[in-house]
Amino acid sequence: MFQAAAKTLSVATTTAATLTRATSFSLRHYCKKTPAKLRVSQAVAGAELGATVKVQGWVRSVRAQKANLFLHVNDGSSLQSLQVVASSELNDPLLTLGSAVEVTGTLRKSPHQKQPVELEADQIHVVGDCNPVDFPFKIKERHSLEYIRQFPHLRCRTNAFSSLLRIRSEATTAVHSYFKENGFVQIHTPVITSNDCEGAGELFQVETSGLYNEEGEKFFSVPAFLTVSGQLHLEVMSGAFSRVYTFGPTFRAENSQSRRHLAEFYMVEAEVSFTQSLEDLTKVMEDMFRSATEHVLAHCAEDVDLFHKHVTPGHRDTVEAMLKKRFPVIAYSEAIDILNQSSKKFTFPTDWGCDLQTEHEKYLVKHCGNVPVFVTDYPYDLKPFYARDNQDHPKRTAAAVDLLVPGVGELCGGSLREERLDLLRARLEEAGLEDTYSWYLDLRRFGSVPHGGFGLGFERYLQCILGVDNIKDVIAFPRSSHSCLL
């Protein structure tokens, strides 16, 4: 009996000791300090200096010496890569340009002036290998925008295009910040619509790939299209909100392969109620342009410098001049006089009543000091049905305005909207659109106010501040006629 009790006590003691050791091991395991995981931008800024850290990214360069191994690793968070220094024992045949790695080590001040810090690696793990022979980008080559455009699925891994995407992201934030700070309400306007806001007929029709049901009924009861503008929907909202805006994709089915056109692009559009002055609209356009550009220059200095130094040398002076000077305003009639008095031979006519072409717009910008310029009061027949009639016979004009900028031409287009029911109805009847836009007439019947708005092409804005010549180089995935990769 005593032996059985002693045996039971021995087993219990052994079990307790085992549990104590297991608990102790578990506590040691979970209390062990793990390396801080840093983005490359944090590491190069000196965060966690002297601590053991972990960095994940892609190899931008690799150099092996007899005793040491040097890597530059980037994760897309900054233009500057992090230098990794390791013993040659950590070298791996899979460590090549483009390979994905996870590096753990101590972050220290660098003895070299070219980089403020470096990571002394204890461990290097290749997460994803990359064959450097087949990879289209090489370490010691500077690739042109034209070359990297051939690889839409890989070009984000180059310095130039990763910088562009960071700038684009920051510019998007800047636009939203401007509108928020100035009391605008953001509206998500629909991508699928039944109206052709611009009236140019360059529409993508939307329909299912097959019949909706056995009777042959289509998905939509009326023809539906991808939107060319959110303006008309913003006008709906401007009957309840005095300041609204939208920022989203728009589509044009223009059969063009030029460096100026995209089938899918982004538009910033705003509508302001209780205004009878184009000056109210031009103030918003100019203030937004300045605010967004100053924000981008302040928050993406290195990325912008890359473009201004290596892609478009000298363009920084143009941008600074745009920010220093107020934007001049000229009437369309004055613009025509300037063009006709010029010694330059234009391809397109410059008679009063003609639409301004890109060559005209760029000339006017240079004539006005190579800064953005507003052109107002266009011929009435050149503008859509919603543009307000100035009623200034015999040369009938509309209260419309375009903002022309260096290197691009037209950046913004806007107008006061025709709020007078009888004039709007007459124009819609003349165009045979009264039934189609009966809802638009309702906006004038119930609590209508004088209002106006504009649209800004976001890709053209990026072209303007960076000096990029081809619009396909300022959007992540360009869609244009006969080109829809990925």
Image (tube, rainbow, N blue to C red):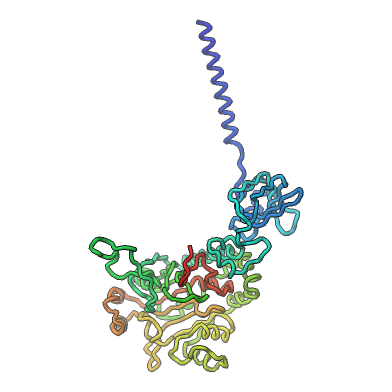
Q: Give the number of callouts.
A: 0
The x and y percentages for residue 219 are 29, 64
Asked if one can make out residue 41 in the rendered structure from this viewpoint, the answer is no
The answer to whether 470 appears left or right of 112 in the picture is left
Q: Is residue 240 above or below residue 397?
A: above
The x and y percentages for residue 138 are 65, 61
The x and y percentages for residue 96 are 65, 53
Asked if one can make out residue 396 in the rendered structure from this viewpoint, the answer is yes
Q: Nearer the viewer, residue 99 or 278?
A: 99
- Residue ID at (42%, 79%): 415
Q: Nearer the viewer, residue 318 or 279?
A: 318
Taking the view exactly as shown, the residue that stands out farthest to the front is 133
Taking the view exactly as shown, the residue that stands out farthest to the top is 1
The answer to whether 209 appears left or right of 343 in the picture is left
- Residue ID at (57%, 66%): 164
The x and y percentages for residue 70 are 71, 52
